[in-house]
Amino acid sequence: MKLVERKHINIERWDALVESTPSASVFSLSAYLDAVAENWSVLVDDEYRAGMVLPFAVRFGVKTLYTPIFARYTEWLGLPLQGEQIVEEIRKYFPEAQFNFNGDLPGLTSNEFVFQVIEPGKERATYGSQAKRMLSKFEKSGMSIHESQDDEEVLARIRKELPSKVSALNDRSLDRLDQLISDLRKKGFLRILEVKDGEMTVGGIFLVEFNKRVLYLKGAFAEKSKKEGAMYGAMDFAIKMAMNRDLMFDFGGSRVDGVRTFNCNLGGKDQLYFEYRWDNAPRWFSWLKKANRTWKRK
């Protein structure tokens, strides 16, 4: 196994490895990473039969392994490798790490987190009482849902509604989302659901269809439409779309309890992933990071 920097990766062979791994997520595709990661490399064998993505940031000359915004985790692809070998290899290159992985890495302490999915093969997900109430309100509201090829209305709504509610959504991360949406559309992986009240677009959601999975990426709605069940209506539409085509529906996941409650109310079932950390960086690096954070708060 060797680490290969982005500029030296054989992208055609890497993406072929991602697409040929049955459970691989869109988070490992080159187009996805080019949009969301500050930098990324791969740990891969010479034949591109096995490997994993290693996104990283560089601060004061030190490389930190991390999980980019809009990506949930990294994963091992292709032929199996022992967890001990994975850890040994990646620790050679990254003195500091705070990243998510979708499996167990022996010898490292971890924090457990969950995301929610609905497995394929269900005619209809089992909804909770809150979801049923909100869907009833949506049906009475007169709003409509349709698939769209135009991302501008939904992106504009996200820029208007979400930054004040989600601290990670700033100008830089929203620019990354714009680029990601553009790249996914070019690849043919993007699905857009737009919700209208008459002729007015009141919100919508972005979905990613890849590897027999429909992933909820991001969405936003005007407050009045949310109170009338617009978000529930759009998610219900997306879930049925996935179930009708025998695809898994992936809610994307969130560490916010309220979001998990929302997802579970629409039939989502918990799946585990893990956060790993280590810090072997020089002491001066920790001091500089702390000083930089203090300066930014002033």
Image (cartoon, rainbow, N blue to C red):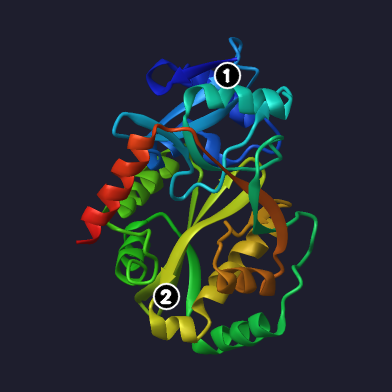
Residue 28 % position (x, y): 54, 35
Q: Position of residue 166 (x, y in %)?
A: 39, 66
Instruction: Please tell me which residue is depicted at 36% across the width and 56% down the height of the picture.
Output: 150
The image quarter containing residue 251 is: bottom right
Q: Quadrant of residue 158?
A: bottom left
163, above or below 19, in the image: below
In percent of width and height, residue 196 lies at 42, 75
Upstream in sequence: badge 1 or badge 2: 1
Residue matched to label 1: 44
Work out whether residue 259 or residue 140 is closer to the camera in this orientation and state it: 259
Residue farthest along the top direction in this orientation: 46
Residue kind at label 2, given as amino acid type: Lys
Is residue 106 among the parts visible in the rendering?
A: yes
Please identify the quadrant where the N terminus is shown. Answer: top right
Q: Residue at coordinates 71% horizontally, 29% vertically from top-left? A: 83
Specify few, some or many for label 2: CA neighbours under 10 Å numbering under 14, 14-19, or 20 or more. some
Q: Residue 168: where, in percent of width, then height?
A: 38, 58
Disc 1 residue type (three-letter)? Val
The structure residue drawn at horizontal position 70% and vertical position 51%, both measured from the top left corner, is: 247
Which residue is nearer to you in this view: 148 or 20? 20
How far apart are the alpha carbons under marks 1 and 2? 46 Å
**Secondary element at tag 2:** strand
Q: Could one spot residue 58 in this view of the protein?
A: no
Q: Residue furthest front?
A: 283
Q: Residue at point 72% right, 79% down?
A: 128
Q: Residues within 10 Å of mark 1 (few under 14, many from 20)?
A: many
Q: Which residue is mark 2?
A: 196
SS for dot 1 = strand
Camera-side residue: 13 or 258? 258
